């Protein structure tokens, strides 16, 4: 009896996922010590990230092999574009970030590279590729949210709400559906399929880790002063 | 003012940073660490491999008169891969098996996502800016490099007349596309131009400083870089762009008649 593909991918990426849980940015959310300046970077960059992430679900609607899956992706797409983006905007307000500021955000190199990777994999790959590319975000945030929810609640309500959102049952059930969908679509993976999906899954995991680095340190394009 | 002149004025500081990059100056002067050049070769080989599906993905969007020249570009890129293989064998560099550096991976994703999602004029802008940056960069190296340098064949490939003629043709077509574009589309083309130059600069920076990914396991960074070739070692490695230069001359002639 072979382990489901999602579990095999998770095992392959475990060091990268553990490095995220151990990242000072993530730990700082958990204990409430993260400087607001660093977290603001996440709020801004994640907003532009989400727009592109929605495109991946749009591709999923187009590529799904059955009506039930098409409907599910369409619901997620609707939720992302018409609810989550609005939630993100009101959440940003709690950090003094206006809607105009959010709309004016330009992508830093890691955000740009990660979203380009996601949308081009969604466009060029099959459903398994698409799911392997998006799961490290969709599933990874749930793992982080649940891990942080297991500790003491941070005093800063904004961080506590962040944890609650990703540790919520709603996110948990969406994550489980996506994992099971990957397992269903792939079935018993042959070696080349596993190798391909592993590379995609690891790359997205690597980008997730790099996203925390970016928000922790700040990031610039080379010659940022010359580029504008 | 032409579209390209407008962009070059707008992004003049970026062009300066590219043309004055230490990687190019040290390659020209023969002072570059051979391992640094080897790093660039391995990464650029991965990039050229990925440029082939980029061109392929443009074909469904392309006007029919671009089909033949774009097919020619694919052929020329395959010859460029042979040029890398021949040079690498000559100097004892192992070309294959290196994981893509972040700048290389990011640039490739930008190309492929542009081909899938952007309009044809925007994607064409990326193609032009990338090729033009290569031509201009290697012209810097050409003016002063020792003719016996092992890197002279790269200079001849990208600073040579055939490649210059191909870039000139790309530029002419870009002007036509820009003239027909709405102001909003021209702005998107300009942004694509800017991003391409940033990636070109980031690529030299990466080669010169060998930047990496978070984490240390190279194996984890390894990705599917695109189709693998089984190169024919007998294939010519010189004049990769000659068929395109011919086409450019013909196409320019045709345009003149219109």
Image: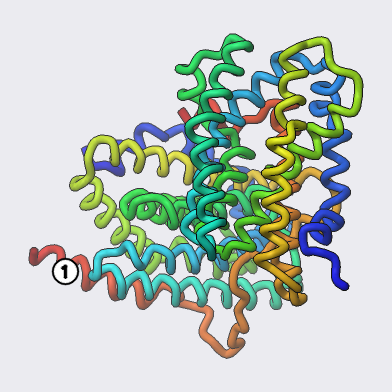
**Residue A65, quarter of picture:** bottom right
Q: Position of residue A26 (x, y in %)?
A: 81, 28
Q: Residue at x 45, y 53 (%)?
A: B130
Image position of A161 with respect to A121: above or below: above
Q: Position of residue B92 (x, y in %)?
A: 76, 73
Residue sitting farthest toward the right: A151
Residue A88 visible in the current orientation:
yes
**Residue B224, quarter of picture:** bottom right
Image position of B244 with respect to A217: above or below: below
Colouring mode (rainbow / by chain / secondary structure / one colour): rainbow
Identify the secondary structure beneath mark 1: helix
Q: How many marks?
A: 1
Q: Residue at x 37, y 32 (%)?
A: B10
Please name whichever residue, B45 or A103, is drawn nearer the observer in this view of the structure: A103
**Residue A43, quarter of picture:** top right
The residue carrying mark 1 is B253
Please name whichever residue, B149 or A45, is drawn nearer the observer in this view of the structure: A45
Q: Chain of mark 1?
A: B
Mark 1 packing: few (<14 Cα in 10 Å), some, or many (20+)? few
């Amino acid at each position: 009896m072979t382990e489901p593909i999602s579990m095999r991918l998770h095992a392959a990426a475990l060091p990268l996922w553990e490095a995220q849980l151990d990242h000072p940015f993530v730990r700082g959310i958990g204990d409430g010590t993260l400087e607001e300046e660093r977290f603001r970077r996440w709020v801004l960059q994640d907003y532009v990230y989400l727009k592109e992430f929605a495109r991946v679900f749009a591709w999923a609607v187009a590529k799904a092999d059955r009506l039930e899956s098409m409907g599910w992706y369409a619901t997620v797409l609707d939720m992302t574009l018409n609810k989550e983006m609005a939630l993100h905007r009101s959440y940003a307000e709690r950090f003094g970030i206006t809607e105009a500021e959010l709309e004016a955000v330009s992508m830093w190199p890691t955000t740009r590279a990660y979203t380009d990777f996601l949308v081009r994999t969604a466009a060029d790959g099959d459903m398994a590729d698409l799911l392997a590319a998006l799961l490290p975000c969709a599933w990874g945030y749930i793992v982080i949210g649940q891990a942080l929810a297991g500790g003491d609640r941070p005093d800063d309500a904004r961080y506590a709400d962040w944890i609650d959102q990703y540790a919520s049952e709603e996110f948990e059930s969406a994550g489980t559906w996506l994992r099971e969908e990957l397992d269903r679509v792939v079935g018993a993976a042959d070696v080349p399929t596993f190798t391909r999906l592993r590379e995609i899954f690891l790359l997205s995991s690597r980008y997730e880790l790099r996203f925390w680095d970016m928000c922790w340190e700040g990031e610039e394009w080379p010659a940022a002063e010359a580029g504008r | 003012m032409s579209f390209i002149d407008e962009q070059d004025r707008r992004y003049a500081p970026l062009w300066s940073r590219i043309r004055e990059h230490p990687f190019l100056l040290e390659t020209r002067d023969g002072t570059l660490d051979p391992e640094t050049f080897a790093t660039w070769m391995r990464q650029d080989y991965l990039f050229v491999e990925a440029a082939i599906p980029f061109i392929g993905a443009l074909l469904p969007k392309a006007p029919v008169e671009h089909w033949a020249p774009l097919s020619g570009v694919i052929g020329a890129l395959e010859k460029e891969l042979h040029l890398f293989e021949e040079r690498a064998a000559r100097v004892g560099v192992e070309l294959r098996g290196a994981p893509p550096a972040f700048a290389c991976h990011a640039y490739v994703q930008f190309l492929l996502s542009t081909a899938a999602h952007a309009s044809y004029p925007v994607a064409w802008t990326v193609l032009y800016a990338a090729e033009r940056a290569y031509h201009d960069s290697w012209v810097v190296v050409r003016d002063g490099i020792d003719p016996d340098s092992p890197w002279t064949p790269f200079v001849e490939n990208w600073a040579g007349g055939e490649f210059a003629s191909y870039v000139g043709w790309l530029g002419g077509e870009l002007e036509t596309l820009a003239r027909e574009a709405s102001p909003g589309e021209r702005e998107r083309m300009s942004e694509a131009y800017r991003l391409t130059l940033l990636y070109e600069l980031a690529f030299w920076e990466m080669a010169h400083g060998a930047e990496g990914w978070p984490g240390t396991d190279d194996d984890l960074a390894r990705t599917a870089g695109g189709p693998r070739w089984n190169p024919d070692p007998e294939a010519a490695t010189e004049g990769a762009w000659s068929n395109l230069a011919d086409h450019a001359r013909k196409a320019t002639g045709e345009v003149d008649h219109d």
